[in-house]
Amino acid sequence: MNKRQLFNRAQYIYKNVPVYYNLAKELGIDPDKAKEFEDFPIVNKNYMLKWGSSCISPEHTVEYLQGKLISCRTSGSTGQYLEILWDETDYKKSLIELWMKRVKYYNIYPHNRLTYFFTENGQDGLFISGEHELGVCKNLLTDKGIETVYDKILQWNPEWMLLQPSSAAILCSYVNSHHVRKPEALRYIEFSGELLADEVRRMTEDTFGCAVADQYGANEVGSIAYECPYGNMHVMQSNVHVEIADENGNLIETCGQDGRIILTSLTNRAMPFVRYDIGDRGCIYKNTCQCGSNKPVIKLASGRANDYIEFSEEERAGSYLFVRILDKVNALTQGAVRQYYIEQRDYDFFCIKICRDDETEPEYIQEKFLECIDEPRLKNAEYQFEFTDELFQVQGNGKYIYFKNRIRK
């Protein structure tokens, strides 16, 4: 999409989609008098959270009311929940370039057997079986559940796996400490959802002996960038427009200078995102890569790096256990939890701050939270709750975080 097309799209959205129409009124902006795409303001998740269903395009309102749109929430890995809506055709379109790269670089097709890990969002069971995929609930990635998980993976014998780096680290630790065999058909692993550390990449390559690649994406816009075999994360320009801005919202034109990552979806028409601050930081390089692509390269400076829950000096589990609990609470309370932040102060003591909606009593949310705990070591822990009606900021390395282990301050 060229600059003029991008401007026309943004102008149309600001004149027709309620959340943007109201933002223009608040800021005194007349979309008809805008001259450049950059004349439209940068928005963040907090603003979108406030407007709810007003973020939906009028053309898709009937589909929304009929339940025909794909609905998902942001992963909760930042502690903030935003319901994302997609038209099914647009959603599939958003994945075309990603699949073309998977096929080109690693010979991976949609029919190849996949294993992926999910955070429970009201699904039944800890495993989801499809014709070409096996989903595994992250809740099982504990000392007690990992053996069951790995046995299931071996039975499925995936040709590729889609993993968060924290999940990959747990799998690698299990394989290496128990000297178990690798899936015979496995030939590719793709990382997504968290900042990928070099040590996790090396450990995964050494453990599973297959090709690995990193993918940067978000539920709001789909795939943002994908790593080529030469280690560069090329922007998916058919799906998203990427800008880098400083703290004051000014565009950073200097190649390689770090700033806020600002995204505009080119495919999500049901719930458009225009100049959206995703909460990550990074920089853009413009050069021709050895892979043959001349598309901009993005380098992340911060992302979803997760601390681990510690139960003792020897026992730990992924902090996604809490994401799972809060997802279940939202399923039971029709999305009463808008944001949360959890600190671990001791092996059995956690402080939990929750931003709730205006209609649900704190006592009810607290009751449902405790009911939804099914990990025995968390069930026996002590919790201190704090409730607020206002969204709040907790940042780590420029990224909103939802969990922090403070046992070793």
Image (cartoon, rainbow, N blue to C red):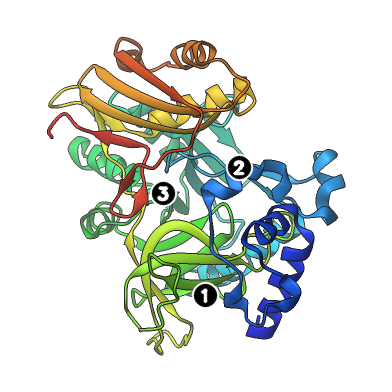
Q: Is residue 348 above or below residue 189?
A: above
Q: Secondary structure at mark 1?
A: helix
Q: Amino acid at mark 3?
A: Leu
Q: Amino acid at mark 1?
A: Lys
Q: What residue is at 60 percent from the left and 25 percent from the top? A: 358
Most distant residue in the front direction: 28
Q: Is residue 175 above or below residue 236?
A: above
Residue under pointer 2: 50
Q: What residue is at 48 percent from the left and 73 percent from the top? A: 243
Nearest-to-viewer mark from 1 and 2: 2
Q: Secondary structure at mark 3?
A: strand
Rendering coords of residue 187 (x, y %): 41, 59
Checking the image for residue 104, the label placed there is: 1
Q: CA distance from mark 1 to mark 3?
A: 20 Å
Q: Residues within 10 Å of mark 1 (few under 14, many from 20)?
A: few
Q: Secondary structure at mark 2?
A: helix
Rendering coords of residue 335 (x, y %): 60, 29
Checking the image for residue 163, the label placed there is: 3
